[in-house]
Image: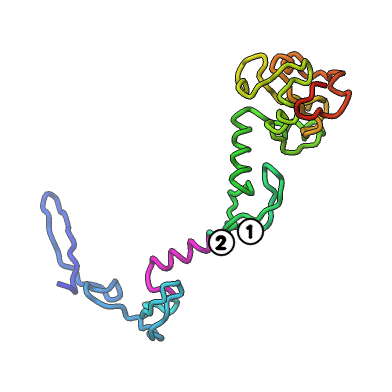
Amino acid sequence: MADTDYARLRIGGLGLVCLIANKPGRGRSKGATSSYTLKDSTPRVCAADCGKTFVPRAAHSRFCSRKCQTKINNRGKQAARRDSTERPCNYCRAQFIPEYGSLRRTYCTTTCRDEAKRKVRSGSCHRRRAEKNGGRYEPVSKRKVFERDGWRCYLCGCDTPLTKSGTQDDAAPELDHVIPLAAGGDHTYENTRCACRRCNRAKGSTIPAQGLQGPPRQPGGRG
């Protein structure tokens, strides 16, 4: 049966089954082994980190299993996607080397990452607006500015307590640029003041004369 093939012929309404002799070279019969003989069948050490010894099935075999081969291939692809060169932080602009060469790492620390996300959520675009209009930029803490100005509005002198921060109250403390960013002002500690919400909204993009009379006052000052 191994040396013959079945062929089905249909003549009219009758189905006939014929036996056809197997032609030489048409293929190996069931159970036959390959005629290829490996020249070097000595045991080899797997090229992966498993350290196992195996008998190769082909002359170019380097791995003991498909699992080790896939592991090494994936490791090569990951290495090609890594970059361990220094890059600037997207928030503080400090140079840093990302851990494991991750291309997705854009912030030097988790603190910079959280601060950047907080500013995005609050609608702050100070860096983009300053660079767009030719102004300088440096990270500015609102809390430090408010404490420096004694939690008082530099325009009208009213109190802007911390308890009203983030509210819609007219006395809520807000960060104001003396020279607006739209007019080429800098986002720095020198150009920022504590202002109440009412004055900040009324001022808009204008430059108040009293805001340019001197440097930022010390905490507790009224000038």
Quadrant position of residue 27? bottom left
Q: Amino acid at mark 2?
A: Ala
Looking at the rendered image, the quarter that the N terminus falls into is: bottom left
Q: Which mark is residue 220?
A: none
Query: In the figure, 41 relative to 143: above or below?
Result: below
Asked whether residue 182 appears in the rendered view, the answer is: no
Q: Amino acid at mark 1?
A: Ser
Query: In the figure, 116 relative to 23: above or below?
Result: above
| Point 76% across, 17% down: residue | 157
| Point 62% across, 32% down: residue | 120
Q: Nearer the viewer, residue 22 or 93?
A: 93
Query: In the figure, 13 relative to 41: above or below?
Result: above
Q: Judge the density around disc 1: few (<14), some (14-19), many (≥20) Cα neighbours within 10 Å.
A: few
Q: Nearer the viewer, residue 11 or 127?
A: 127
Q: Is residue 67 magenta?
A: yes
Residue found farthest to the left: 14
Q: Position of residue 16 (x, y in %)?
A: 12, 58
Q: Position of residue 155 (x, y in %)?
A: 79, 18
Looking at the rendered image, the quarter that the C terminus falls into is: top right
| Point 85% across, 29% down: residue | 215
Q: Position of residue 168 (x, y in %)?
A: 61, 16
Q: Is residue 119 magenta?
A: no
Q: Main secondary structure of the magenta part?
A: helix
Q: Which mark is residue 84?
A: 1
Q: How many angstroms separate mark 2 from mark 1 (CA)?
A: 10 Å
Range of magenta residues: 62-77
Q: Position of residue 66 (x, y in %)?
A: 38, 67
Q: Which mark is residue 79?
A: 2
